[in-house]
Amino acid sequence: MVRQYELQLPAIISRYWYAIRWDVDAIWRLDLAVESTPAELLAWHMVVPVWPDPSGEPYRVTPGEVLRQPHVHIREMQRILNALLEYPIDMYRLQKRLMNLDGIHRLARACLGLHIDYLTVDHAAGFRPPIR
C-alpha cells in the first residue's frame, strides 16, 4: 500500500526552498566562485526540517536532530558520515540569508563535533533562478 501524505510544508521551507525553482544538476555545471564563509551564517540550516521522519513523513526532521539522535535517524546519519567535505556547499542568497541549494549533508558533517569558524561554499551570485 502506498501511503499518501497531506503535505503541510513548514513555513521556512515554503519561504526559502519553494520560493524559487532550481535544479541541482544545473548548479553543478556553473562555474561558481568558491570562498570561505563564516559558519554562523549557515547555522540556521541545522534547525530546518529538511528530511522525512522514520515513517517517511516529509519535512519533519532537522539536521540537528539527526546529529543528536543518530540511532533514530540511521539513514540520514549514514549520509552525513559519508558526505565529502572536499566539495563546497552550494549556496544562494535569498531574502538576506544564505540558502543551501546543495550540501546539507556536508554542512551537517562539518558541524559533527567540530569547532568550525569558516566553511567553503559556492556562492551562486550569478545564478538567477525563476521566482515561483
Image (spheres, grey):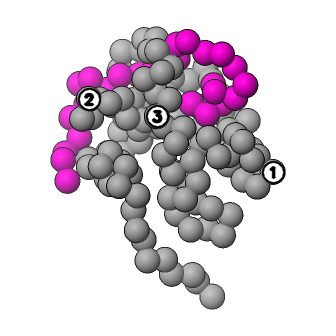
Farthest residue in the right direction?
71
Q: Along the line of sight, which residue is nearer the eye, 35 or 94?
A: 94
The picture places residue 127, in percent across and down from the top left corner, at: 25, 30
Residue at the disc numbered 3: 44
Residue at the disc numbered 1: 71
- Residue 98 lies left or right of residue 116; in this view the side is left
Structural distance between the alpha carbons of marks 3 and 2: 13 Å
Residue at (72% x, 42% y) in the render = 68
The reply to whether the C-beta atoms of the residues labelled 3 and 2 are less than 8 Å apart is no
The picture places residue 23, in percent across and down from the top left corner, at: 36, 45
The amino acid on which the numbered mark 2 sits, given as a three-letter code, is Lys
Residue at (48% x, 21% y) in the render = 40
- Category of crowding for the residue at label 2, using alpha-carbon neighbours closer than 10 angstroms: few (below 14), some (14–19), many (at least 20): few
The amino acid on which the numbered mark 3 sits, given as a three-letter code, is Trp
Tag 3, which secondary structure? helix
| Residue 54 in the image: above or below residue 90 | below
Magenta highlight on residue 127:
yes
- Residue 28 appears in the picture as rendered: no
Tag 1, which secondary structure? loop
Structural distance between the alpha carbons of marks 3 and 1: 23 Å
The picture places residue 53, in percent across and down from the top left corner, at: 62, 62
Q: Earlier in the sequence, mark 2 or mark 1?
A: 1
Picture disc at residue 31: none
- Category of crowding for the residue at label 1, using alpha-carbon neighbours closer than 10 angstroms: few (below 14), some (14–19), many (at least 20): few
| Residue 58 in the image: above or below residue 124 | below
Q: Which residues are magenta?
A: 107-132
Structural distance between the alpha carbons of marks 2 and 1: 35 Å
Residue at the disc numbered 2: 96
